């Protein structure tokens, strides 16, 4: 099985691809926190975010259609999760479904804000992962001094995802080859056992992997890599983008100051 | 193999019990001389893999291990792990990083080598196992033969005195196996090879040690041990 589609556009060469991964990770994190905390009904910051993303995507030469295709499903999922939001009381009633259930102006605004924030956030992360290989993101996390154990857990999850998916497929085939069928109670018993087996196998593998690490001199205390300094271009992006996003948030306040 | 060459690894009277009390190894001793390639054979469950884990101090049974004239102790364990390079049976256990480069660099980095030297070793070791240009590849997506080679490279980069390999030709097709035999012949350093592959033993090794039920059953030169089909069957090798 091949999950290479995750890395399809990582090999392109563009200013966004060349940007230091630490800067990309930090900028995405700062943008996400600013967007997520934007109060509902404030559309200028979100519009600016969209412009910023489209601009970065065009610059990176990652096709916009690809970004949409990867981000929209997540927005759809959030739309489903937040489906009760429009019915929140508050403001003018827009549509009355029954005497007790109505779509309120405030609810609709909240719903639209939640969906667009989800879409923007996912699109930003998709753009990050399309312009930076996973290994480089991990390296950046380590260089940003995130706890090494945390970075390793993420790294192992990525590495063994493939192994576990393959093992699950093999087990499923072996099960189906023996005419798996019958009632749901039997189904759930068998599936429960499969999950248990997968867990045990992963647990045993973890022990073997740890032995392989120890055998090559692993010591949890060591931080072997030296960080390279950021270029002036990297620094400029690191400062300019978050300042721009923050500016779009503060626009009404800035205008009010005059 | 001249008999006066230097001993690089010596194990004396190793016994080990599993935590549940079952005896896994009993009074196992072995000697390895510089540059020697020793085959470790025996049926499944004979204790071969358990023995290998002891050579890297990953298990601690009773007995004495000496590597390159250095007795195993708390102070020497890291050096011994660098000198004895353990290649695990399943490369998916050994290749745990997101790229081949990171995996091969893991050992040298833990040795505290500077980045330029780490990079030099990674390229050199990948070249030595015939995987030039694989640096950025994800180990999960390599073929089984490539994974086996990459696993050897991860140890090669630490410049061990002894390679310890657990079934290096297991699961390989005929061509992959021939390629791996050539690779084993080209590696510098002594080797202890656990295998069921008689062709490998004939092509690569000079001496065989046969294990059964946690003990050493017999040992000798390859032609002597492999000469008698009836005995091979008794030992569970054929």
Image: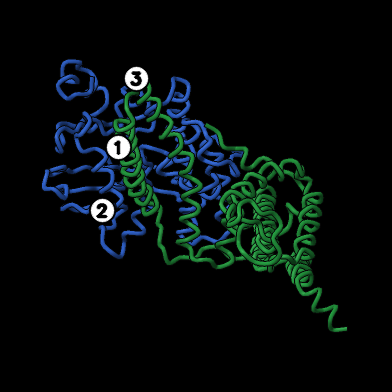
Residue named by callout 2: B66
Q: Earlier in the sequence, mark 1 or mark 3?
A: 3
Along the viewing direction, whichever of A3 and A84 lies nearer the viewer: A84
Mark 3 lies on residue: A179
Instruction: Provide the chain ID for the residue under circle 2.
Output: B
10 Å crowding of disc 3: few (<14), some (14-19), many (20+) = few
> Spatial distance from mark 2 to mark 3, Cα to Cα?
55 Å
Q: Is residue B14 visible?
A: no
Residues tagged by mark 1 and mark 3 found on one chain of the structure = yes
Left or right side of B13 for B107: right
* Chain (green): A
Residue B129 position in % (x across, y down) = 51, 37
State how far apart marks 2 and 1 are (Cα). 45 Å
Which secondary structure, mark 1?
helix
The quadrant of the image that shows the C terminus of chain B is top left
The residue located at (38%, 42%) in the rendering is B87
Label ID, residue A193: 1
Cβ atoms at labels 2 and 3 below 8 Å apart: no
Question: In the image, residue A177 lies at what x, y percent?
Answer: 37, 20
Q: Are marks 2 and 1 on the same chain?
A: no
Residue found 50% across the figure and 33% down from its top: B146
Where B37 sits versus B9, above or below? above
Q: Residue furthest bottom?
A: A257
């Amino acid at each position: 099985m091949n999950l290479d589609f995750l890395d399809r556009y990582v090999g392109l060469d563009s200013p966004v691809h060349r940007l230091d991964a630490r800067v990309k990770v930090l900028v995405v994190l700062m943008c996400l926190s600013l967007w997520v905390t934007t109060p509902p009904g404030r559309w200028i910051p979100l519009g600016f975010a969209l412009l910023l993303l489209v601009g970065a995507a065009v610059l990176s030469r990652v096709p916009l259609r690809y970004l949409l295709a990867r981000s929209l499903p997540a927005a759809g999922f959030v739309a489903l999760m937040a489906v009760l939001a429009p019915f929140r009381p508050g403001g003018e009633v827009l549509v009355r479904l029954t005497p007790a259930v109505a779509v309120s102006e405030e609810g609709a605004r909240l719903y639209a804000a939640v969906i667009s924030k989800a879409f923007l956030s996912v699109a930003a992360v998709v753009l990050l992962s399309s312009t930076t290989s996973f290994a480089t993101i991990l390296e950046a996390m380590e260089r940003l001094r995130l706890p090494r154990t945390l970075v390793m857990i993420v790294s192992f999850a990525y590495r063994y995802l493939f192994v576990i998916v393959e093992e699950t497929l093999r087990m499923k085939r072996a099960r189906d080859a023996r005419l798996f069928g019958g009632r749901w109670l039997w189904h759930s018993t068998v599936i429960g056992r499969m999950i248990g087996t997968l867990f045990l196998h992963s647990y045993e593998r973890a022990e073997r992997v740890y032995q392989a690490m120890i055998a090559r001199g692993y010591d949890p205390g060591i931080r072997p890599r030296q960080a390279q300094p950021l270029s002036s271009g990297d620094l400029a992006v690191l400062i300019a983008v978050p300042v721009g996003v923050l500016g779009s948030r503060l626009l009404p306040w800035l205008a009010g100051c005059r | 193999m001249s008999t006066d060459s230097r001993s690089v690894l010596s194990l004396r009277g190793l016994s080990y019990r599993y935590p549940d009390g079952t005896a896994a190894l009993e009074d196992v001793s072995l000697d390895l001389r510089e540059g020697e390639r020793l085959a470790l054979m025996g049926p499944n469950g004979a204790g071969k893999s358990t023995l290998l884990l002891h050579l890297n101090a990953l298990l601690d049974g009773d007995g004495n291990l000496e590597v390159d004239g250095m007795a195993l102790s708390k102070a020497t364990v890291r050096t011994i792990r660098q000198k004895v390079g353990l290649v695990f049976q399943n490369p998916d256990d050994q290749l745990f990083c997101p790229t081949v480069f990171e995996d091969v660099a893991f050992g040298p980095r833990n040795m505290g080598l500077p980045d330029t030297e780490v990079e030099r070793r990674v390229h050199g070791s990948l070249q030595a196992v015939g995987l030039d240009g694989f640096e950025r590849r994800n180990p999960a997506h390599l073929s089984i033969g490539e994974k086996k080679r990459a696993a050897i490279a991860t140890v090669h980069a630490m410049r061990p005195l002894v390679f310890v390999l657990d079934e290096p030709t297991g699961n390989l097709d005929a061509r992959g196996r021939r390629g791996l035999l050539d690779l084993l012949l080209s590696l510098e350093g002594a080797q202890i090879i656990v295998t069921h592959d008689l062709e490998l033993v004939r092509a690569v090794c000079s001496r065989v040690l046969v294990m059964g039920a946690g003990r050493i059953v017999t040992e000798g030169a390859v032609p002597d041990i492999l000469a008698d089909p009836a005995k091979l069957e008794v030992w569970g090798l054929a």
